[in-house]
Image (tube, coloured by chain):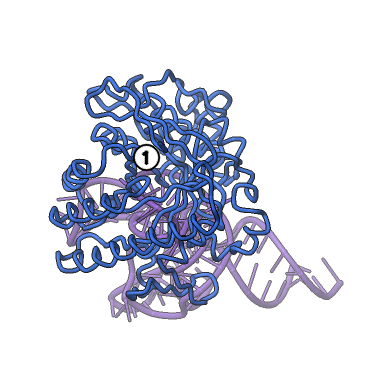
Chain colours: A blue, B purple
Amino acid sequence: MRYVRLHSQHRRIRRGILTTPHGKIHTPFFMPIATRGAVKNVSPDELLSIGAEIILSNTYHLIQRPGLAVLKKHHGLHSFMQWDGPILTDSGGYQVFSLSKRRKITGEGATFRSEIDGSTIHLTPENVIDAQLAIGSDIIMVLDECPPYPCSYEYAKRSLATTLLWAERGKRHFEKRVKQRRLAPASRPLLFGIVQGGVYKKLRDESAKALGALDFDGYAIGGLAVGESRKIRDRVLAWNMKLLPPDKPRYLMGVGTPADIVDAVRMGVDMFDCVIPTREARHGRAYARISNSTASMKKWYSVMNLRNEKYKFDKKPIDPRCLCAACSTFSRSYLRHLFSVQEGLAMRLTTIHNLAFYQSMMRELQGLRL
RNA sequence: GGGCGGUUACCGAAGCAGUCAAACGGGGCUGACUGUAAAUCAGCUGGCUUACGCCUUCGGGGGUGCAAAUCCCUCACCGCCCA
C-alpha cells in the first residue's frame, strides 16, 4: 500500500503515511513550490531544516528550461537540484489555465507559444507522462484542463470530457511505461488523476466516479481557488470528498491560505501546495501565530506587511513563537530595512519564515508536537 | 568687477501666458497575490474633503495683463566663461 491511514481523533481529519520512491511523508502535508527546480530563495538544506518533506515542481517549465536533455544527463531533477526527498510534478495543466491567452486546446493535447522564446510547446497526455518520468518525479500528475471561473455548464462539460479522456490516455501510457521499464513497485512513481467539472455537482460527481474507476494512486481536486467564493469552493470540495475513494490520498491543488488549508483538512484533504507562503514572502507579507492552536475559535494567525512603516522601530521577531532561522535572529525592523533597500536577504528570511509557519501548522494538523 | 545660464512639489526633471495642483523618473506610503509569465502588479504621494469642490504653491519682493510657473524690474543664491 502506498498510502496507509492512521488513527485520527478528529472525526474527519485524515492522518496517514504516503510512501514514495524517495521516502515516506506524513499526511496531511504541504508542498512548497519549486516551479523551475528551486523553491525561490531557499536552498534544499534550508528546506530540510524548515521541515519540508516534499516539494512540487512543474513539467511545463522544466521542459523549456533546463530541458529534459539536461535533466537526463543528471539522472533526474533530484540529483540536478540536490533535493533527495519526494517531488511531485504538476503536468502543465495549470498553465493551460494561467497561460490561456497563449495556448490552444486540441483534442490531442494543448499547444503553447512559449513566453520565453516564442517557440511552440505541445503537451499531450502521453508526453507529459514521459517528461515527468524523465524528471524523476515521485508523484506524477495527469494532464488536465483547469477551466476558468466563472464558466458555463456547457464549457465545463466539454472541458471535463477532454480532461477525462486525457486522464485515461495518461493512465494507459503510464502503465505501458512502467511495464516497459520493469519498474519495481517501490521505485514506481505514483500517478494521480485530477477531478474537474467546474462548480457543477453533476460534473464533479461524474469526474470523481470516472477517475475512481481508473484506480489512480491518488486524486487531486483541481479547478478550485480560481476566483470562486469560499462558500462555493467548500460546497464543491464536499461533493468531491464524498465520492473519492477513501483509501487514496486526496490533493487539493493550489490551496491555499492557512485558513483554507485548515478548513480543507477538516473536510478530509491530505495534500496541499500553494505559492502563497513563498510569493507573499517575496512581497513582504509574513504570517504569525496569534493562538497556539489552529483549532482556536478566534482567528489564530495574522499577516503583516513587513514593508509597513509601523515596523520601522519594531524590534520583535516576525513571530515571537516561531523557532525559524529568521525569527530566532532578526527583528521586524531589520527585515523592513532589508525590504526597503531591496536586499535579497529580506526575501530569503521571510520565505524561510512563511514556510516554517506553514510547516508548523501542518505538524499540528498531523497531530504531532510542534 | 563684467558676460551668459540657472533656481519648479521629498529628490531629479518637463512645462515658458489661459486646457497647471503642474508631465515623467526616483523615493515614500498603501494594497493585491491560492497546481508561480509574479523580486510582480495596482493605487496614492501640496492642504482640507467620502466625493463634487474649495484653498495655498513653481527662489524673495514688486510690476504688466481679463489671466503669470510662463512676460518685465529688482534682490538673493548656484553654475560656466571673461577680467
Q: Check disc 1 and report the residue beneath it.
A: A271
Residue at 35% of width from left, 25% of height from top? A6
Q: Identify the image quadrant of the C terminus of chain A.
A: top left
Q: Position of residue A100 (x, y in %)?
A: 35, 69
**Of residues A247 and A28, the one drawn nearer to the viewer in this rendering:** A247
Residue at 52% of width from left, 61% of height from top? A131
Q: Position of residue A335 (x, y in %)?
A: 53, 35
- In the image, taking residue A57 as reference, residue B34 lies left or right, namely left
Residue type (three-letter) at the residue carrying disc 1: Met
Q: Residues within 10 Å of mark 1 (few under 14, many from 20)?
A: many
**Of residues B39 and A191, the one drawn nearer to the viewer in this rendering:** A191
Q: Position of residue A39 (x, y in %)?
A: 54, 46
Q: How many numbered circles does the render carry?
A: 1
* Quarter-of-image position of residue A364: top left
Residue at 34% of width from left, 73% of height from top? A105
- In the image, taking residue A198 as reference, residue B14 lies left or right, namely right
Q: Is residue B68 above or below residue B60?
A: below
Q: Position of residue A7 (x, y in %)?
A: 32, 22
* Quarter-of-image position of residue A135: bottom right
* Quarter-of-image position of residue B22: bottom left
Q: Identify the image quadrant of the N terminus of chain A.
A: top left
- In the image, taking residue A28 as reference, residue B60 lies left or right, namely right
Q: Is residue A183 above or below residue A158?
A: above
Residue at 21% of width from left, 69% of height from top? A158
Q: Which structural element holds mark 1? A: strand
- In the image, taking residue A363 as reference, residue A7 lies left or right, namely left
**Of residues A27 and A23, the one drawn nearer to the viewer in this rendering:** A23
Q: Which chain's residue wears label 1?
A: A
